[in-house]
Amino acid sequence: MIIRKDMPVFHEGIQVIQLTEEECGACHVYMEAQVFFPCSSKFILHRCATAHGADRNNPGHRYLLCDINNGCSLETLTEETGTTGPAVSPDGRYFYYFVDETRLNGGRLILKRIDFSVSRKAEVIMVLDSPLPGTSTIPSRIYSLSTISSDGCRIAISGFLGDGRTERAPWGLMVLDVEKGTVSVVKQGPEWINMHPQYCRSTDILHNRDIMIQENHGSSVEKDGSRKELVSGDGADIHLIRDDGSNFRTFPWGRDGMEFCTGHECWRGRSDWAIASVWYRDNEDARLLESRGIEGSGHAGLQTPGGKRNDLSRSFDKPGFGHFSTDIGGRLLVSDYFLRDIYIAKLGVEGKMAASDWTRIADSCSSRSKASHIHPFLSPDGKKAFFNSDQTGVLQAYMITGIENAGL
């Protein structure tokens, strides 16, 4: 690690630490990914990657274990080519990841697991090399993010279900039961191209099987699944589904021609409230709105009847918040501001209170390019913040300590 005294911070006692020095670049996994251990002192990052994922066919791509309490040491966990979709079990015992050896309607997708209570050796948990139940195809173009249920029993990930001949072939949400060794496709369709699946982190049985998913209406791909157009803005809406495919619901955000989902949303800690970044055509604000999924199978966004919304950013003069996350308690939020500065804020009562005490803590010094988005997030205990930056000319992973000195 390198203590970066040259990078601007805005409160005494706050410190920026560069965690990686990789020539090929390194960064954090996308901020919604479940890659932290519950102790808040260990987490997964990766090398030979960009802010929006890795070239899984790059032989240099590796997942690394960062041990903050051991001088931010980095331990290589994977050696295989094709690794994607990392997830740490909520109890911190297991590290799951996929090895993508798929091709269009062929090859195989392997789920592996490292049991930290035993060794660092990965074991194969499941191999998907035949058509999935309810489909006639083997999945391909596997999404770069997976999500794990709060009881650690199920992992969800998405992929393309086309055969190379069918127009508007579907993408599907796969749920793998790691205890039973089974897989099911619980949602599929041609516009689930950028699904961003996220299990609710609640341990309540009413919510712990809910998965938040994103649909991008109007998006299109070639017959082989290669992307022609990804439509966000007018096209994006956010839904909620139980992991058995039942109880499809909608979040009341966007889709009215004025308010747009920017494409990033996440759960507020372990609650059943979720937060989305929304952009407004009239004044180019990017606000943070929280809501719950509500009954309704349509795609009317904020016009869905019965929606309750709370603008967390309403006290901020010029909101420009695109990527963000909360601590596991849902009481502290970190966000980028117009893709560069990093802000911290307190969260109050769900559904009622605006975020308060917005505090600028650091300048990421990022170039703001898409490949180098800073994507800030917090450790589960909310004591440390993390971000990416290409300040050195190469993307690297960073940590901010001492954020308690910001007065929050």
Image (cartoon, rainbow, N blue to C red):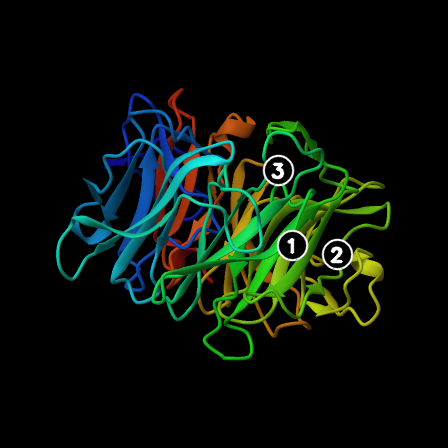
Quadrant containing the N terminus in the rendered view: top left
Residue in view at x 81 percent, y 72 percent: 306
Labels 3 and 2 touching (C-beta < 8 A): no
On the rendered structure, is 103 left or right of 383? right
Vertical order, 314 against 151 (above or below): above
Residue in view at x 41 percent, y 61 percent: 182
The circle drawn on residue 276 is: 1
Q: Mark 3 or mark 2: which comes first in sequence?
A: 2
The circle drawn on residue 338 is: 3
Labels 1 and 2 touching (C-beta < 8 A): yes
On the rendered structure, is 304 left or right of 77? right
Amino acid tagged 2: Trp
The circle drawn on residue 231 is: none
Image x and y of residue 316, in percent: 68, 53
Q: Give the distance between the C-alpha atoms of the residues marked 3 and 2, in whole angstroms.
A: 20 Å
Vertical order, 230 against 317 (above or below): above
The part of the image, by quadrant, that contains residue 15 is top left
Q: Mark 1 or mark 2: which comes first in sequence?
A: 2
Amino acid tagged 1: Ala
Image x and y of residue 20, in percent: 28, 33
Residue 319 in sight from this viewpoint: no
Tag 2, which secondary structure?
A: loop
Amino acid tagged 3: Phe
| Crowd tier of the residue under label 1, counting other residues whose Cα lies within 10 Å: few below 14, some 14–19, many 20 or above | many
Tag 1, which secondary structure?
A: strand
Q: Nearer the viewer, residue 130 or 269?
A: 130
Residue in view at x 55 percent, y 74 percent: 207
Residue where numbered disc 2 is placed: 253
